[in-house]
Image: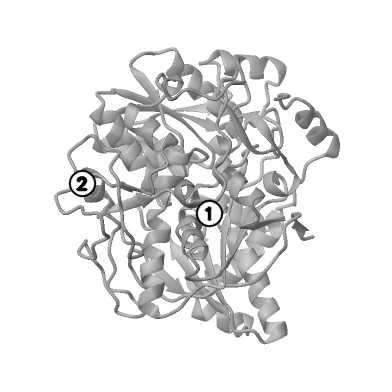
Amino acid sequence: MLVTSHHTLQTPVLMDTVYTAAGPQQRTSLLCTPKPRAAASSRRSLSFTARASANSGAKVSIPKQWYNLVADLPVKPPPPLHPQTHQPLNPSDLSPLFPDELIRQEVTDERFIDIPEEVIDVYELWRPTPLIRARRLEKLLGTPAKIYYKYEGTSPAGSHKANTAVPQAWYNAAAGVKNVVTETGAGQWGSALSFASSLFGLNCEVWQVRASFDQKPYRRLMMETWGAKVHPSPSPATEAGKKILATDPSSPGSLGIAISESVEVAATNGDTKYCLGSVLNHVLLHQTVIGEECLEQMAALGVVPDIVIGCTGGGSNFGGLAFPFIREKLAGRMSPEFRAVEPAACPTLTKGVYAYDFGDTAGLTPLMKMHTLGHGFVPDPIHAGGLRYHGMAPLISHVYELGFMDAISIQQTECFQAAALQFARTEGIIPAPEPTHAIAAAIREAMECKRTGEEKVILMAMCGHGHFDLAAYEKYLRGDMVDLSHSADKLEASLAAVPKV
């Protein structure tokens, strides 16, 4: 059953296969203290590493700057609050967790931030990523819509997460940090940070949500191959983990619990910093390389999206694609709709409340104004482990409250039907469970176009491949996968614990 938000729903989008970056705009940065890229200027250049598109032959570029949507919003997002005083957070309060440059990026109102040369050098391993027209899927569906997907599965770690893992690792290394810690759900973020840490000489320790740790052993092995130490979460290695295990020894874990464990380690060890794969502003900032490239790719094809669709857990994949397009819409240069798609078992935008809440289960993080199911909410162990987070990125939540986007939730069997039997068997790519939500929503839109005859352009985020998720596909193909939801009592109890601010 389709669950919608209080915002008005709208329709599909368009695309083809290319590689490019975006928009002719004045860029005034810089936040980075490390040496600036020699070719950087205040106006975007089109002279970066380019590849030929498999479909159009157009050349595109790796962006030189990240884009900060906060600069263009008519209403600024509410500030994070100190967990004890409930007063706006001082940037220095974040120093135990993050190096100074990432803190500056977290709080800045600058529109564009220059990407360090060393980061672009690593991006060149896989960027620009392809924009692909799903022609065979369109033919299968018999739709007049044009379906495009921006494919981020070409990174060494297999997902979009490397777009922020590389700069986070580099900024930590540049600040003299030796050890970084983090959490991960399905393992895509943990893999990406392990990869990036190996390039910059950092020791990396990862707390992986227990349900995914058990479901996806090859993700753990990938992290260990890159040198990371991986714990199942909750674990006996931290006080937060011990408390959870004492009350529920068989806990499947959650991203909120894993965040508590890794934040605890960072906050109590002076030689260690924390890295986060989603939610925070600087993370979404780094991901905008996706949307900036996509803008240039679509311009090369002469198409404009009618709708932009992406899955949402913490929000980085959706924001990375959508934010540059929202900028263009605010400037009056295009008018697409934006749709976030979340799992029915963890419907943060569609069922959560917009309130100040902790980003972790133990209450160690600052209070953030976001859509939340309550920091104590532990989602059922669906196969899209990367979407099992109780809260939504504050910036995504704010954009949602402003009415610039809508949201729906979809059950996992519909998502695997769309991905396994339709997308994979026509387009050839086996998606990770997370982007199957975007695929399912895009297929819904394409079928509505078939009904109405509209030739809409549908753009969706394909944030990673599912090569390490084949156990989930096996479960679906054997008919053993069931839809999971949340009990009303469980949700009511977790929402009752949201701090009163």
- Residue closer to the observer: 93 or 432: 93
Looking at numbered disc 2 in the image, what kind of residue is underneath it? Answer: Glu
Q: Is residue 423 visible?
A: yes
Residue at 61% from the left image edge and 36% from the top image edge: 211
Residue at 66% from the left image edge and 80% from the top image edge: 449
How packed mark 2 is, by other alpha carbons closer than 10 Å (few <14, some 14-19, many 20 or more), is some
- Mark drawn on residue 352: none
Residue at 35% from the left image edge and 62% from the top image edge: 129
How packed mark 1 is, by other alpha carbons closer than 10 Å (few <14, some 14-19, many 20 or more), is many
Looking at numbered disc 1 in the image, what kind of residue is underneath it? Answer: Phe
Residue picked out by circle 1: 318
SS at mark 1 in the image: helix
Q: Residue 34's spot in the image, x, y percent?
A: 21, 36
- Mark drawn on residue 117: 2
- Tell me whether the residue at label 2 lies in contact with that at label 1, contact meaning CB atoms closer than 8 angstroms: no
Q: How far is the residue under mark 2 from the one under mark 1?
A: 25 Å
Q: Residue 253's spot in the image, x, y percent?
A: 62, 30
Q: Residue 322's spot in the image, x, y percent?
A: 50, 58
